[in-house]
Amino acid sequence: MRWRCWPGQGGTGGRVAPPCAGGSGGSPPRADTALLRTRGLVKVYRADGVVVEALRGVDFELGIGEFVAIMGPSGSGKSTLLHVLGGLEPATRGEIWLRGQRVDSLSTAGWAVLRRRHVGFVFQFFNLLSNMTVADNVELPALLAGATPRQARKRREELLAELGIADKADVAPARLSGGEQQRVALARALANEPSLLLADEPTGNLDSSNTRDVLRLLRRAHAGGQAILMVTHDARVASLADRVINLFDGMVADDAKMVSIPRSANGVADVLELRG
Amino acid sequence: MRQPLLALLAKEPAHGYELKLALEQIFGQAYPSPNIGQIYVTLKRLEQDDLVRSQDVEQATRPNKRVYELTPAGREALRSWVDEPSKGPRVRDEFFIKLVLAPMSGLADRMELMNKQRRHYLGIMRNLTQMQADSDPADTPARLLIEGAILHLQADLDWLERCQEELV
């Protein structure tokens, strides 16, 4: 269902409503069930006369509740794609649609409002506010989105309990382990029950057992219907996804539904045989 | 199968079925459940090689059982197995040979081959992470074996990425 009703539009400047949009200018096809879509997404960096094409025409979609992992060599554009999709950096060309709304043409403020409500972010280095407590870090997004202090607090309590860090509410983030900080970051990202969770190498800075914990939480969030788009090098994390996209040289080189390899009755014993 | 049996007999003499139970108990689900016939055949060969010896022990209500014990030569063989480093990683990789040669034959595109291989590795990884989630936390050998397989597979995927960077 990739853009099947949006025939080639190259050269029209990318700001034109799709030809099959039903009447009201700028809305996507009526049958559009995708949560997020991009079309011909291009990002060019220019610095000191050097031009770097980080994204060279990315067409991609994410379904409601879908979990997609983005892999690829370093420099292939993975983080750039995530940043552009989350509105942290503007696209140079191309279209981004979120929940049926064209977002790349929104004003900075307009997108910030939309993002606050519908997009959660998790980064490799947690990016928690160091001068606030864990509780305040998690409550802030809800307050910014217009929740009452009571609502924000309730949601924060639920999330911290679910992530097993309820006892850390009044602590400063710097006093927590990496794994705990990432759980706080996850709680903050999920505070507004976003339609979309964007995660950039969320386990990249964690040891094996903390990675397993974060994996378990992501798996649970996904099972609860959370849509996730995640950049990762960690194949364990990627293998949980519904689809894995391989980005190469700023373009989608592979877009594959994940399938399990049939297992035999021997269970773990087969692990011995997997290695040739 | 030879060395594990020698290692178990180094602890104490045992009969075939006890050895099967011991292997299952120690390795949990990490080790293929050994076939009792295979154990008897291996014990017989070890005896022919003079690494173990056996004697029949009478049992009141059942047929005699044959109890095996390690010989000095068996202990020596076990020691040299333990002392010698185990084989390192594979250096020849079938997929790599395919990747290098396939485009010459005009049969496959490298990007396509790598995509196929990556999907396959990720599929295996999915099974392993599932097994890891399902595994009994008390079954340490099984957990470590799964973790080892996961790390190997991650290295294969990282290497695939390197191939992608250099060969495409």
Image (cartoon, coloured by chain):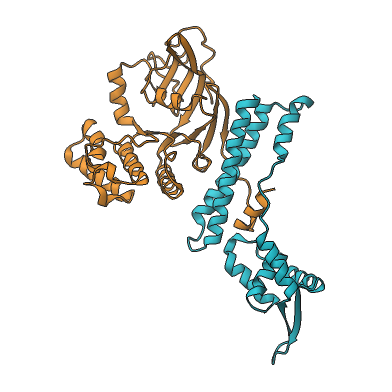
Chain colours: A orange, B cyan
In this view of the protein, which residue sits in the foreground, B48 or B111?
A: B48
Say whether residue A243 is left or right of residue A211. right
**What residue sits 63% from the left and 72% below the top?**
B21
**Image quarter of residue A87:** top left
Residue occupying the far right of the picture: B48
Say whether residue A223 is left or right of residue B57. left
Residue B153 spot, x, y in % from top left? 59, 44
**Image quarter of residue B52:** bottom right
In this view of the protein, which residue sits in the foreground, A249 or A47?
A: A47
Residue A137 spot, x, y in % from top left? 25, 38
Residue occupying the far bottom of the picture: B60
Say whether residue A214 is left or right of residue B28. left
Whether residue B127 is visible here, answered yes or no, is no
Tell me the quadrant of the picture where the N terminus of chain A can be found.
top right
Residue A125 spot, x, y in % from top left? 37, 36
**Image quarter of residue A201:** top left
**What residue sits 27% from the left and 42% below the top?**
A173
In this view of the protein, which residue sits in the foreground, B91 or A62?
A: B91
